[in-house]
Amino acid sequence: MHQATSVTELRQYVQHWKDHAQTIAFIPTMGNLHAGHISLIEKGQSLSDRTICSIFVNPMQFGPNEDWDHYPRTLDKDIALLEANGCDLVYLPSASELYPEGLERISHVQVTDLTDDYEGAHRPGHFTGVATVVLKLFNIVKPDVSVFGRKDYQQYRVISKMVEDFNLDVQIIGQETTREASGLATSSRNQYLDDAQKQQAALIYQVLQRTAQQIDKGERDFEMLQARATGELQEAGFKTDYFCICNAENLLPATTEDRDLVILVTAAIGQTRLLDNIEISLW
Ligand code: PAF
């Protein structure tokens, strides 16, 4: 597996592959890789000739009270995992190259409509940081396709909207969430859970599934379903910031006319805030 740390170096590899008519899939990450990331790499491999993964703990998407310094950095393990899974190149940009004048002076990408609520409300400025770094990475790597996990559903929609709004020439693929046997969505944050908390966390997906089944069977009182699910999670000891049945495209609260829905939820156990969702098609 090749490694590139500068834009110039990265572009040399990409140019060489493009000269040989090879297509490129790109998977941006912040490292601390797990099975969910590997499924993104595998998806990329199935769609293109070459797969590039970037590892960059992007300071711009962390709020002042969020711990950028303490974000888990496991570079050697990540590189070994990427190598073992046949990734062609890992790109390890430096903050000084991506943000040469610091975070204050860089132009920002503000994706409208999708970023005010849910994670956007909980983490002001977060999606501006995500969209800005992803646009930069797309312009550096120039991939044909880029794969994002549907677990971070709002992020996946934000990136898709940015690509649409700015006519970017890259296809965005939303990869299905990888789950543990209990149904718990695979996430870097799961490492902060002890065994009992992990067992407890399985309830999140069970509640999502039960709510989705009720909608599937024809229940359309979304407020009642949301209140019931939130109650169930809170009774089990979770703190929920939101449990919202939404239109899957614009993420507005669902109406009875909507056919493609997504239920977005965050549920925290202790200090660990878990995100999950379930998509429902009523066609
Ligand atoms: O999902 C992530 O890990 C990050 O938000 C991303 C897309 C790599 C941007 O820093």
Image (tube, rainbow, N blue to C red):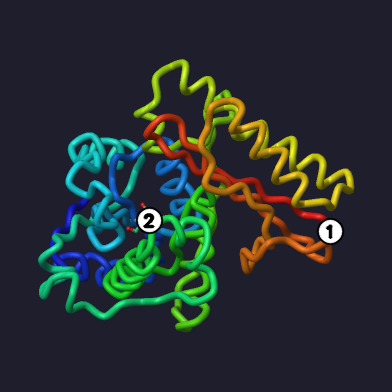
- Residue at the (46%, 60%) spot, across then down: 121
Give percent across and percent down for residue 147.
46, 57
Left or right, 177 with respect to 28, comes to: right
Q: Position of residue 145 (x, y in %)?
A: 45, 65
Q: Secondary structure at mark 2?
A: strand
Q: Is residue 276 left or right of residue 11?
A: right
Figure quarter occupied by ligand 1: bottom left
Residue 53 at x, y percent in the picture: 31, 54
Q: How many marks?
A: 2
Q: Which residue is mark 1?
A: 283
Q: Quadrant of the C terminus?
A: bottom right
- Kind of residue indicated by mark 2: Ile
- Residue at label 2? 27
Q: Amino acid at mark 1?
A: Trp
The correct choice, above or below, for 99 with respect to 230 in the image is below
Estimate the spatial distance between the alpha carbons at disc 1 and disc 2, rounded to whole Å.
31 Å
Q: Residue furthest top?
A: 196
* Mark closest to the chain's N terminus, 1 or 2: 2
